Image (cartoon, rainbow, N blue to C red):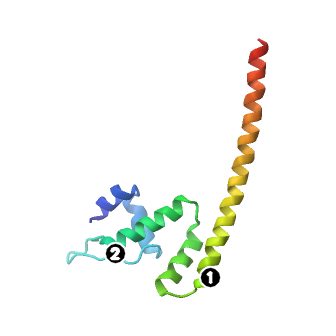
Amino acid sequence: MTIGEVSEKYELTTDTLRYYERIGLIPPVPRKKNGIRDYDEQACKWVGFVKCMRSAGVQIEPLIEYVSLLQAGTGIDRRKSILIEQRARLREQAEHLRATIERLDYKIDHYEELFKKR
């Protein structure tokens, strides 16, 4: 697949795909003889994995470390701890969002009470 096709399939810009490859989130993508990227099934799996992790809120730096360890086949304990750390961070964010939603609900209820009194 061309970078354009992968971009469309995974809803990522071509610049993002090049960036992910440059920083090591995606292993070097095979290229045709003319130098054009030719995403194979394995490269697409990496794109899907990275997109999933980024969509979940996993930060770039820990993800780079995770992918590096995964590609090297080392650091099983560290890989697990990276995922645990990111999960904890996401849970913290979720709690913050829950509290914000509660505050908004309170304010909306307040306005609804005001409208009833009119």
Image-quadrant location for residue 34: bottom left
Q: Which residue is mark 1?
A: 78
In three-dimensional space, the C-alpha distance between marks 1 and 2, rounded to whole angstroms, equals 26 Å
Where's residue 16, x and y in %? Answer: 43, 62
Quarter of the image with the N terminus in it: bottom left
Image-quadrant location for residue 100: top right
- Given residues 39 and 45, the one toward you in this image is 45
Q: Which residue is mark 2?
A: 29
What's under tag 1, amino acid-wise?
Arg
Where's residue 32, x and y in %? Answer: 22, 75
Disc 1: CA contacts within 10 A as few (<14), some (14-19) or many (>=20): few
- Residue at 44 percent of width and 68 percent of height: 19
Q: Answer yes or no: do the residues labelled 1 and 2 have beta carbons within 8 Å?
A: no
| Label 1 element class | helix
- Given residues 54 and 77, the one toward you in this image is 77
| 108 in relation to 72, above or below | above
What's under tag 2, amino acid-wise?
Val
| 105 in relation to 1, above or below | above
- Residue at 59 percent of width and 66 percent of height: 59
